[in-house]
Image: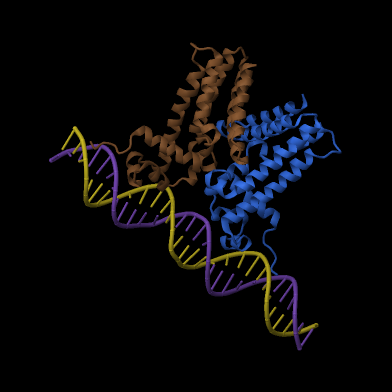
Chain colours: A blue, B brown, C yellow, D purple
Amino acid sequence: MRPQKVNDADLMAGLMSVFRTKGYEGTSLNDLAVATGLQKASLYHRFPGGKKEIAEAVLVYARGWIENNVRQVLEDSNEMPAIRLARALDNIRELYGNGKETCILRALSMDQGLSLFGDGVQQNMEEWISGFYRLGIDLGLEHEDAREKAEDTLIMVQGSLVVGKGVGNDSVFDRAIRHLSRLYLT
Amino acid sequence: MRPQKVNDADLMAGLMSVFRTKGYEGTSLNDLAVATGLQKASLYHRFPGGKKEIAEAVLVYARGWIENNVRQVLEDSNEMPAIRLARALDNIRELYGNGKETCILRALSMDQGLSLFGDGVQQNMEEWISGFYRLGIDLGLEHEDAREKAEDTLIMVQGSLVVGKGVGNDSVFDRAIRHLSRLYLT
DNA sequence: TGTTTATTACCGAACGATCGGTAAATTATA
DNA sequence: TATAATTTACCGATCGTTCGGTAATAAACA
């Protein structure tokens, strides 16, 4: 068979990059074609379901990333909680380019996006929350406290990304991440 | 002159409602026409600059709302800080329909929206932050602490709206608002 | 082995629908 | 009558999507 012009990893990274900066409605098939170096028709060869299927695949890709770089890191019982937290937060910092990038979950959860991908968005968020929940439990928190603290972690990150972009200040995200360290370790 | 079929207040409310649920790119002039009961061409009569001018007007409208219902309430030196905070948070709760609605600032701050309306979004956020900053000062906080706490207020609200929608749980927003009360009053 | 047959990956061109936007005409007030 | 508000009809451009066809590899057969 003919070799793939673009491998799957690069493809998914390129597709996610477009969706997370432009949102679902703001992203055109042309944008996706330019970003991946494939023609529109070629994208339809790989994703017969079109734009919707591409966005779904991106959410699966994102979920895998969170599972590997956040949840599993936080649940690694071979390491001390403080180490796990530091590593997870480093990965999160990298994921969002120190606050310069937006979150794919926010980008795909406006109105139409939410009705199309609501389940995928929810699964991503639950993946995230369950990691920090486990960290809280391992630090001796009660069930309800651990759940709320984990939820607050996601809230702070999402909120700081929105506000940081809005006020045009990169330090907002940085401060939020540092705040999360203290939240768990004091 | 012929009377307006739709008055300005209803018009702005309808326009904002569409933008905040669908985002800038996700909103079509047809959507705006249906929501307001006017034809597309009538919208162009009122807003010759088209979609962009409409979104700008919506941001001005939103800023006025925040100024009246958040900043001025928080800065009302005739009331005790606790009363001011409670009133402002009530207004915020109402603005977001107890977490069921999204924020117009988030909706208009994706990529293209941010490059078109970045200034308007920033002004809205600064309006918000400056109100809570004043509250913090009146509660005896130092400048830097007051600024950070005010920023955190906006972060928590924006974040809880994103996460609440994402996980499909109305109580996320409620809990965030209650958390903000404790943040200032303890 | 050499040759045919399928299969896979990709592309250029075009589809109908909808996009944001405009011009001219109609309706209603003053 | 002059003018402001609204409407119908329309425009070119772009949207997501589909189609016909080509190049290259893999599989099947001789």
Left/right of residue C15 with respect to residue A81 in the rendered view:
left
Q: Is residue B85 visible?
A: yes
Left/right of residue A138 with respect to residue A26 in the rendered view:
right
Residue at the location (75% across, 32% down)? A143
Left/right of residue A141 with respect to residue D12 in the rendered view:
right
Q: Residue furthest right?
A: A78
Q: Identify which residue, A177 or A138, lies in the foreground.
A: A138
Residue at the location (53% across, 12% down)? B80
Left/right of residue B16 with respect to residue A91 in the rendered view:
left
Residue at the location (33% across, 39% down)? B46
Q: Is residue A164 visible?
A: no
Q: Quadrant of residue D3?
A: top left
**Percent coordinates x, y for residue A145 in the rendering:** 72, 29
Q: Is residue B153 above or below residue A93?
A: above
**Percent coordinates x, y for residue A130 in the rendering:** 73, 39
**Percent coordinates x, y for residue B154 in the rendering:** 58, 28
Q: Is residue A8 above or below residue B79?
A: below
The quarter of the rendered structure image containing the C terminus of chain A is: top right
Looking at the rendered structure, the number of numbered marks drawn on it comes to: 0
Q: Quadrant of residue B165?
A: top right
**Percent coordinates x, y for residue A53 in the rendering:** 60, 56
Q: Quadrant of residue B12?
A: top left
The quarter of the rendered structure image containing the N terminus of chain A is: bottom right
